[in-house]
Amino acid sequence: MENNKFYITTPIYYPSGNFHVGTCYCTIVADVIARYNRLIGKDVFFLTGTDEHGQKIENKAKDAGVTPKEYVDKIVANSKELWKILGISYDRFIRTTDEDHEKCVQKIMQKLLDSGDIYKSEYEGKYCTPCESFFTESQLVDGKCPDCGREVSLVKEESYFFKLSKYEDRLKEFFKENPDFLIPETRKNEMFASFLDKGLEDLCITRTTFRWGIEVPFDPKHIVYVWVDALSNYISALGYLSDDDSLFRKFWPADLHLVGKEITRFHTIIWPALLMALDLPLPKRVFGHGWLVVGGKKISKSFGNYKDPREYLKYSSVDSLRYYLLKEITLGLDGNFDEEMYIQKINSDLANDYGNLVSRTIAMAEKYFSGVLSRKAYENELNTDSDNELLKKITENIAEYKINNDNQRPDVALDKLMEIVSFANKYIDLNEPWVLAKDESKKERLAKVIYILAETIRIVTVMLKPYMIETPKKVFEQLGTDIDTWDSIFEFGKIKDGTVCKKGENVFPRIDSKAVLEEIKKAEEEVKKEESSNLEGIKYISLDDLDKVELKVGQILEVSKIEGAKKLYKLNVDLGKEKRQIVSGLVPYYTEEELLNKKVIVVTNLKPAVLCKTESYGMILAAGDKENVKLITVDGEMENGEGVH
Ligand code: MSP
């Protein structure tokens, strides 16, 4: 039974915003792989879900004025809705806020403590909140996060550490002994060059400076680092360390963790080390796929080059979207998502090749035989060369389709499938059924040609089942058969004698590319217009207006309180060539000592005013509101009186 199970996972997503086609990519690919394995008869468990804890989510919820749970609940509902639309056939949608997951993570932490793999110390280093990742100084690129290029912050806090360094040798050994553990090969080289060869440092696995996470059971002031929390989902979802761990015993180790390239290191270094510490078998394979890019940039919310996938579904179908992502993007490499190319591909591969094959064949069956398919004619008539070639092609390509799907090359598997489709279209041209139809003595041959075509369509449609959701159902209905099992494609001639096929709606209508692209352009312009009208509330000033304000660097030489004024200081400010008396409301925010010698920015051409009987000849700039006010100053040495531009 061991070989008959298949456990596949996607990363669990941060519910931190809208999902775009880039974030859907991995889940769609995983769904195709899951459906393929179900088709070939495996017992599949397909896991996906959401990674809901961490500082990033806590901050976002705060900005939105809701609790973290309220914040994530809304996004999770949206993502589930989207998975439904995209036909994602997961067996469990895990949320890291699920009670069983939280309990499991706590037990894992306790186990790691008991095995001596955790110790308490202090962490000081850089942290990228959007990526929820710790970095050493040398890993930063220009002082910024090497993964997303954003600013990192300094974190200094008491933490528990996981002894990652202890597992370095075992990990290297494991990589050597299991050449297929991480693919593609390039990712393995990256893991060695960037991490394993440099030496592993122990990993900080708890935080104390925010609360949105799972409490560490033996020290509740701490919460579990979000990546340890998240990675554990792959076993918590199966009931690891719970009263019922039957799924865990059946499905672990995972057959395939499908992940994006930037998170490969978490899955091939930290995760295996944690599993080693827990004394559990390691996943059989981690596949680090590439990114979907638009205009050369990763599709991402932060680059603003994303669209809700539902936008593409306004003019195309889920099946064509799934087909395009699987066929045109080589799994493992980055791939461009270009809408013009997308439409072209739908028209050429799906409308012209596959769709046409289906509609032509069924139309001919209806025209010449009232839709009745003749298995007898197929048996009785001798095979011609073109019959034999088509049948040979089908047998060969089914084998290659399987090998490539087994090896996570769904793009090549689809090529093999589509080769059968083009072969079948050529078969029509070679056999010219419309000519055969004119000769009564060729009626049986014509019936055989139509039967062979119908059976070919049946076989490729079974092969399409992992890739498409609605189309196979529609095509089987039109063919008038429900023989759609994997085994059935190894024997040509399964459609029963007398089966009646019936033309239905066109499965892939041609898209009017020009009209749709114009619509897309119009919609994009609308969005731009809307964005700029959102800015209409702003009162713009011209450069000339700005020039009217004279700003200079000054230094505070004297500070004194003004009698009878609670908030005002009288300041003497050195502006290089002159000294000025300025009144400023800084009493609640700065002491006299704090202000002395401070470099500040002064508006020097503000009309003089009298405040609490004290004359003021300028204004000092500060940021903030009533609660929190900070002076604006210069970043480094600067002469008093220097202009500010
Ligand atoms: N929460 C972590 C994963 C934890 S798994 C234990 C995370 N979440 S994420 O929401 O930021 O990303 C989820 C997945 O989406 C990643 O595998 C990432 O590579 C993928 N993608 C995000 N943008 C993408 C593209 N533009 N193209 C392809 N995949 C992309 O990381």
Image (cartoon, rainbow, N blue to C red):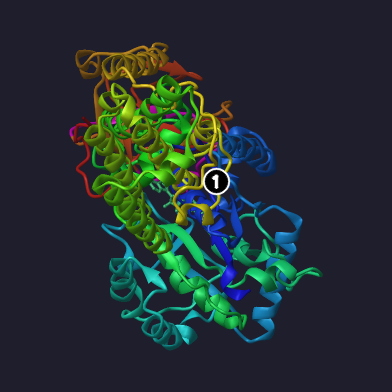
Stretch of the chain drawn in magenta: 577-598
Residue 607 percent coordinates (x, y): 33, 14
Dot 1 beta carbon under 8 Å from ligand 1: no
Residue 613 percent coordinates (x, y): 48, 18
Identified by mark 1, the residue type is Asp
Residue 397 percent coordinates (x, y): 34, 55
Q: Is residue 181 left or right of residue 483?
A: left
Q: Residue 447 versus residue 504: which sits nearer the camera?
A: 447
- Residue 146 seen in the current view: no
How would you rate the neighbour count of disc 1 (Cα within 10 Å): few for under 14, some for 14-19, many for 20 or more? some
Q: Residue 489 versus residue 570: which sits nearer the camera?
A: 489
Residue 581 percent coordinates (x, y): 35, 28
User: Residue drawn at (34%, 14%), measured in percent from left and top?
Assistant: 519
Residue tagged 1: 484
Q: Residue 56 versus residue 593: which sits nearer the camera?
A: 56
Image height of 360 relative to 536, above or below? below
Q: Count the marks: how many?
A: 1
Image height of 522 relative to 361, above or below? above
User: Residue drawn at (31%, 80%), measured in percent from left and top?
Assistant: 197
Label 1 element class? loop
Image quarter for residue 158?
A: bottom right
Q: Is residue 20 magenta?
A: no
Task: Please identify the quadrant where the C terminus is shown.
Answer: top left
- Residue 359 seen in the current view: yes
Task: Please identify the quadrant where the N terminus is shown.
Answer: bottom right
Q: What is the residue that sits farthest to the right in this orientation?
A: 243
Image height of 284 relative to 522, above or below? below
User: Residue drawn at (51%, 42%), measured in percent from left and top?
Assistant: 495
